[in-house]
Image (cartoon, rainbow, N blue to C red):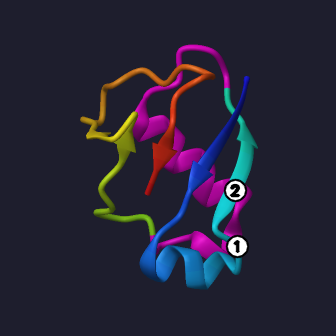
Amino acid sequence: MDVTIRLFASLREKAGTPNINISVPVGTNVQQLLSLVQVEKLELEGAINGVLVAINHEYASADTIINESDDLAL
């Protein structure tokens, strides 16, 4: 599934864009998403460590499953 992730602060600066789009398998959780972001967006490698993830305007835990229609933010 394709997801769009909104970036803030230094992540936005490093990526050079306010949003990134990546494809993830159905059933991907937050921890897996962060790993995939670092692989697909090399400019964010290492910058993702310790970042907070919000799904639909609420902070998410590492095991929270992501859905295609979710509003994701780092």
User: What residue do we see at 63% from left, 15% from top?
Assistant: 26
Q: In this view, does 59 lie above or below 15?
A: above
18 relative to 30 in the view: left or right: right
Q: Give the range drawn in magenta.
A: 25-47
Q: Which picture quadrant has residue 67? A: top right
Is residue 33 magenta-colored?
A: yes
Q: Mark 1 points at which residue?
A: 17
User: What residue do we see at 43% from left, 57% from top?
Assistant: 74
Is residue 26 magenta-colored?
A: yes
Q: In this view, does 24 lie above or below 33?
A: above
Q: Do the residues labelled 1 and 2 touch (CB within 8 Å)?
A: yes
Where residue 45 appears, x then y in whole percent? 56, 70
Residue sitting nearer the eye, 62 or 55 = 55
Q: Mark 2 points at which residue?
A: 20
Where residue 14 appears, x then y in whole percent? 60, 83
Residue neighbourhood size for the residue with mark 2, other residues' Cα within 10 Å, grouped as few (<14), some (14–19), many (≥20): some
Name the magenta segment's main secondary structure: helix
